Image (cartoon, grey):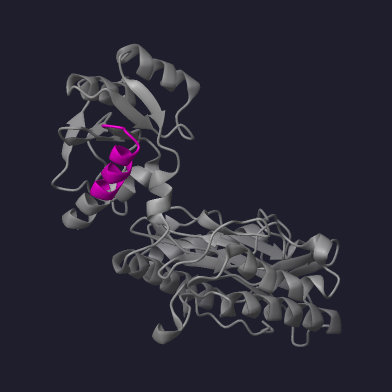
Amino acid sequence: MSEVYATRRMRLRERCNASGNAAALISRPANVRYLAGAAPRGAVLLLGNREDLLVCAGPPDDRPGQGRPDEKLRVHTLPRAGGDPAVTAAGLVADQGADSLAVEEHHVTVARHRALRSVAPRLRLADLGGAVEQLRVVKDEEEISCLRIGAEIADQALGELLESILVGRTERHLALELERRLVDHGADGPAFPTSVGTGPNSGRRGHRPTDRRVEEGDFLSVCLGATYRGYRCEIGRTFVIGTSPADWQVELFDLVFAAQRAGRESLTPGAAYRDVDRAARQVLDSAGYAERLPALTGHGVGLEIDEDPQLGPAAMGKLDACVPVTVEPGVHLPGRGGVRIDDTLVVRPEADGGPELLTITTKELLAL
């Protein structure tokens, strides 16, 4: 993997040099991990004009799932606690003779920006922008493999839950059990707080589990994800509790299923982000649910659960191959509940079989 990280840093350095910056300071944790192999708490990565350094406040964390720094990257640990690795890095790059430093202004606080200026007043501070995030959009096969394993873990945890008795258990209890099962099956942890919604809470995006208990006739919507070696995937499913769903439940489920399928089928290299959103959205819009739709149909995943690209009506850009995204339309009817179906897929060309579905738990309306 050392060659992979070195290549990533070289690509970023080329971008910096093209914009007239001799060095770059990476502070956003996911970006540090992408370029260095690990992101110890508070650490920053310095791409210097002489050498690259991972500057840490203390020894790197060697806990499982935290990653290990690239062995070809020198680790600089602050001599005493309480210092700011970013300020130390700015001083080091100034000592290297650099005249400019690109920083991630979207992640650097005003106070830290002032501290950087004070320690290296002769450095010209420039904005690196989202350069690293742009590099992260297209994944290599090793990254996709981590996402695939994470998806398998999430599928397994969800499948086991569906085999248990659900009636009478609270949303909070089910969410905690799912997160425990994720870890039991090898995940670093949940990719985000697990959402379980029952009855009138079902189908709500980002619903925080409550003490409401599962009842016969409820919709049960579940959204969870696993983190594996730092990479995060997502799956969402909706089921009905009991033996026979009501007509309105079948109708709503079939509609959301059709919208999700339309979105999945539009995932081809070269497809515009907004066209993927439109494919799913127009199915629900034509049925009269325009005002109840989420702002986005889906988003990228990787070292963070919500990355570029954003699949929304105003999104600019086109999909590339090897970009993992979610497709997650849903409809929630206040006071009644709703449906959400969410998959993680990897964009692939038709010659390679089309979009690769990572989350494979059935999308049928099962009666549990």
Magenta span: 9-22
Figure check: 65 above or below 197: above
Can residue 37 be seen from the camera position used here? no
Residue 60 drawn at (x, y percent): 24, 39
Q: Quadrant of residue 161?
A: bottom right
**Relative to 261, 283 lies left or right:** right
Figure check: 125 above or below 52: above
Residue 118 drawn at (x, y percent): 35, 12
Residue 31 drawn at (x, y percent): 37, 45
**Relative to 36, 42 lies left or right:** right
Question: Which secondary structure is most common in the magenta stretch?
Answer: helix
Q: Where is the N terminus found, in terms of image quarters?
A: bottom left
Residue at 27% of width from left, 51% of height from top? 8
Figure check: 307 above or below 110: below
Can residue 299 be seen from the camera position used here? yes
Q: Nearer the viewer, residue 157 or 207?
A: 207
Q: Where is the C terminus found, in terms of image quarters?
A: bottom right
Q: Quadrant of residue 148?
A: bottom left
